[in-house]
Structure formats: structure tokens, C-alpha cells
Amino acid sequence: MKSPFRVIGRVLFLLVVVTLLVIGGVLAYFTSWRADKLSALSEGSEIIKTAWGDVEVVVRGEGPAVLVFHGAPGGYDQALVLAQGLDEAGYKVIAPSRPGYLRTPLASGLLPSQQADIMVALLDTLDISKVTVLGVAEGSPAAVEFALKYSSRVSSLMLVSPVLRRWATWKTDELPPVAAGILDGLTGDVGSWIAVEKAERDPRGLLNDMEAMTSSGTEDQHARVVDGVMANSDQRDWFQGLVSSYAPLTPRDIGTRNDLLQIRNLPEFPYEKIAAPTLLLYGALDPRLPADLVEKVTKRIPSAEAVAMPAEGAVVWLGPDGDTVRERILAFLKKTTQP
């Protein structure tokens, strides 16, 4: 008769072997995914050498130009997600990676004002004289700087879920979800890969997580948004594209950390000097954008219009009114740009 200890030992050994094989398989799958994603990102863009430094960029479409300043974490791929459909509507979308993201070095522009400089140098190199500027979330300070410093190059300014005040401390509830994960040590390339996988396999679960972090609404309000996105294939696809633009995180980490640093030291912008017609789109349930702050800034811009999406948080494209965001942007473009 075999000793029970010997049987238990063999079972434990087999469990260890199976566990190691599973872990090895997962790591191999992740490594392959990361290599393929980095290769696709490099092949999908080009590096433009400008007078101020190198910029990674994608240009799509023909017509009046729209220059996109993406959020954090991000890159040119996120800029394309944020401007989705504009090229098909008759606009030229200029989607750069801001300094510190993907293949645009941080040396090309540390401060928001320097990021404005590198983008105008990009326009010079591309021989584009005038643009509408679209600044989203953490990209909005550089967009505002662009509108202030290069007013003659700006047809109009669109700010979506913008940063309008300093984040004096790095509180988790003040940070974009993935940035909060960086500071908590919960993400990285593996974490961002898991988020991409979850967005594909369990979008409802990830949407619930995102709503909890980006909206000040009640649980019932969050549930209505999540149910609406799950029933709307366009919004669900857009959400998965946004999550994909967070990954892998390593080539976006420097830019994200720089954005957080710059926002901690955000200057008081002279909004009164913005000459371009301005559209400010925000979610009424965005915990970082109280209505009184939005109203205060809007009143300071000579030609500004603020639109609150009543049921949305920081990610205004997702929710009952999310489908109208692109319509509002297109209507504003039609009003403020010339074909």
C-alpha cells in the first residue's frame, strides 16, 4: 500500500507543474500580444522631423484640418479614437502622439506651452496654415496654450472634458483611471493588457469599473449608462478602442507622468485672450468639473459655448447622450471652419 504522504506529494507536484505550465502559457501569450501591438503601432504612424523636434503622427482625410491633443495615457491611436468619423465627414484629422507618448520623445515638449510649439512646427512641416484644435482631458492645457500663442493659426477651439484647475495632490479620485493605477502600482503592460482583454471578454465589468471612477452619479445612474453602452454597438466598439489606446502602457508612461506633473503646476490661463470661437463639452457628472468652474471659465472666453451632457461623466462619448457628441462637434466645425 502506497503511503498517503507519497500520494499527496505526487498530487502537489502535478498541481505545481500544471500551474507553471498555465503561467508560462499566459506569459507567452502576453509577450506575443505586446510585440504585435508595438509593431502595429510603429507601422501605423510616421515620424516627422520638425524644427522643434520629432513628432509621431497620422494624417487622415481631406478638408479643413483638425489637430487633436489626446488625453492620458494616450498616443496617436487615442487621438484617432477621439476624432473618429471626422475624416469621413470631410475633415483632415491630424493625430499626433504628444511628447512622452509612444514614439514622440518627451524632449520635444515638456511643458504645455512647449507642446504647443512642437505642434505648430508640425503644421509648418505639413504645410498646414490653419486648424481647429481639439483638446481632450489631459491634452487640453496644451490645446489652450496653442490657441493663446498661435491665435492666427486657429479657426476654432474644442475642449472636451478639459482640465480647468490644478490637481494639487495626487488623489486617486482626481486622476484618470489608468493613471491612478500607475500610482497605485496596479497596472503596467500586463495590467493594461488585462484591461484590453476584459474590454473584449467582459465589457460590462470594465464599464462598471470605469463609470465608478469617472462619474459622480449614483449606482442607478451608472447602471443606466452601462446598460445603454452594452445595447449600443457603436459605443461599445468605441469604448474598446479607447481602452486599447491605453496599452501597452510602458511607451505611454513617461507622457502620463509628465502630464500629472504639469497639471499639478497648471498656470492660470488668460482665457480672456482666446480669440477663437470655443466649444466646451463636458459631462455633468464629471467629478473633476463642477458646474461653477465650467461657468466661470466659459464666461472668461469671449466667444465660448458650454454644453453639459446631463447623464455622462468624464467620458462623454459613453452614455445616453454619447452619440450626440460627434454631432455637436461636427455642427461646431461646420459653423466655424471654411471648406
Image (cartoon, grey):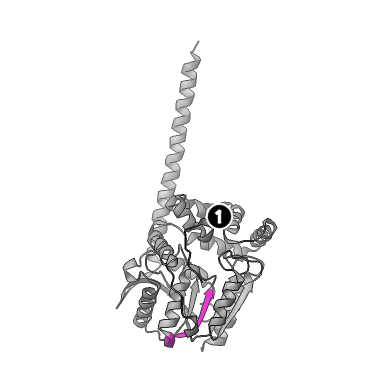
Residue 216: x %, y % from top left: 62, 61
Q: Camera-side residue: 16 or 112? A: 112
Q: Which is nearer the eye, 11 or 305?
A: 305
Above or below for 53 versus 10 = below
Mark 1: secondary structure = helix
| 148 on left or right of 293 | left
Where does residue 133 sit, x and y in percent of width and height?
Answer: 47, 79
Mark 1, Cα crowd under 10 Å, few <14 / some 14-19 / many 20+, is some
Residue type indicated by callout 1: Glu
Which of the two residues, 157 or 86, is positioned nearer the viewer here?
157
Q: Residue at x 47, y 26 (%)?
A: 12
Q: Is residue 205 magenta?
A: no
Q: Is residue 132 above or below residue 229?
A: below
Dividing the picture into quarters, in which one does residue 256 lie?
Answer: bottom left
Question: Would residue 105 be seen by someone viewing this image from the given angle?
Answer: no
Q: Is residue 278 left or right of residue 53?
A: right
Q: Residue 15: image x %, image y %?
A: 48, 30
At x 46% / y 33%, what residue is drawn? Answer: 18
Q: Is residue 293 left or right of residue 264?
A: right
Q: Is residue 75 above or below residue 19?
A: below
Span colored in magenta: 151-159
Residue occupying the far top of the picture: 1
Q: In the image, is 174 to the left or to the right of 25?
A: right
Whether residue 155 appears in magenta in the rendering, the answer is yes
Question: Residue 119: in sight, yes or no?
Answer: yes
Please give the count of numbered marks on the rendered protein.
1
Q: Splitting the image into 4 quarters, where does residue 199 fall?
A: bottom right
User: How far across and down, in percent of the image, does residue 245 sit?
Assistant: 47, 62
Which residue is at 49% across, 24% downward? 11
From the image, tell me which residue sits under label 1.
200
